[in-house]
Amino acid sequence: MANHKSKDRRSEQDENRPAGRKDRHKSKGSKTTSGNQGLAPLQERNGDAAAARIQELEAQLAASQADNEQLRAEQAQPPTATNDLIPRPQNVSKAKMSGMQQQLGMSRARWLAFRGAIREGIFAARLDRSKSWHAQSDKRILKMVNVVRADFPEANRFDNAWGIKRIASESFSNHKSYGRCVDDHNTYRGRKRLERRENRANSDEEEDSPTVNGESRGSSQPSSRSPSPSPSTVPQHRTASTRSDDEDDEDDLISFDDGNGEPPLKRLHRRE
């Protein structure tokens, strides 16, 4: 009886054992399948993120290349007159006048007028010529800059007015050097200036010196003037003036008035 029961138990265990193994295999298979199903979406998500990142980097690279190409194109072209600021170079003293003229887009005549306005601005600001350019008052330099900008608005493109100051400093230094040369009689310009002054003084003395009996004071030669003619009703034509064209005054024949309100030439024409 006992043996029969043990056999029955073994048979039940044998019958139940394959079923248990199958269940375990099924459970393992189900776990593997579910794991593969979870891994696939993760790979897809990672692939999508990587692709998006790659596209973003490619877009950034394309934008950077476009900026570099534009920068190279701007550097290759000569600067023109625009509203953009002209940056201050590292060494302002080496900035060429022709380069600044090209940057401002000025013609030759406009450029010369611009430099002339800077020289006038130096006088208008009353810079101290006994001092160097770097020792000048900032307020006076600013006044000079404003005078130039009023007539040449395009000069505002110079960042912090470096171009105006560059030209002004050179003009100021040249004028000081010229002043030292003309004041020194040992230099060529000084001797020429002294010679002009002496000639001018001698000319004034000859014009102002009185005459005695038709002879100039200090002169041993008799006067070559002919006696004055007797009064005549026929008008005498006056000789042309030998005055210089550089003088500002008008001719004596035009400006002279004997009190009747009109020049003599007009009345002479009426008599004829």
Image: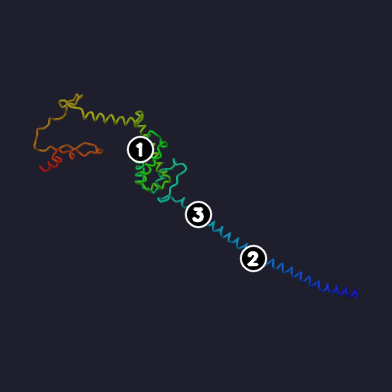
Q: x%, y% of residue 83?
A: 41, 51
Q: Secondary structure at mark 1?
A: loop
Q: Nearer the viewer, residue 17 or 267?
A: 17
Amino acid residing under circle 2: Pro
Q: Circle 1 sits on which residue?
A: 126
Question: In whole angstroms, how far apart are the C-alphas of marks 1 and 3?
Answer: 48 Å
Whether 239 is drawn above or below 209: the answer is: below
Residue at which label 3 appears: 67
- Circle 3 crowding by C-alpha within 10 Å: few under 14, some 14–19, many from 20: few
Q: Nearer the viewer, mark 1 or mark 3?
A: 1
Taking the image as drawn, is residue 272 in sight?
A: no
Q: Quadrant of the C terminus?
A: top left
Q: Residue at x 39, y 40 (%)?
A: 139
x and y percent of residue 81 in the render? 40, 50
Residue at horizontal 35 percent and vertical 41 percent from the top: 121
Is 55 positioned to the left or the right of 225 in the image? right
* Crowd rating for badge 2 (residues with CA inside 10 Å; few <14, some 14–19, many 20+): few
Q: Earlier in the sequence, mark 1 or mark 3?
A: 3
> Of the residues shown, which amino acid type is indicated by label 3?
Asp
Q: Which residue position holds label 2?
A: 41
Labels 1 & 3 near each other (Cβ < 8 A): no
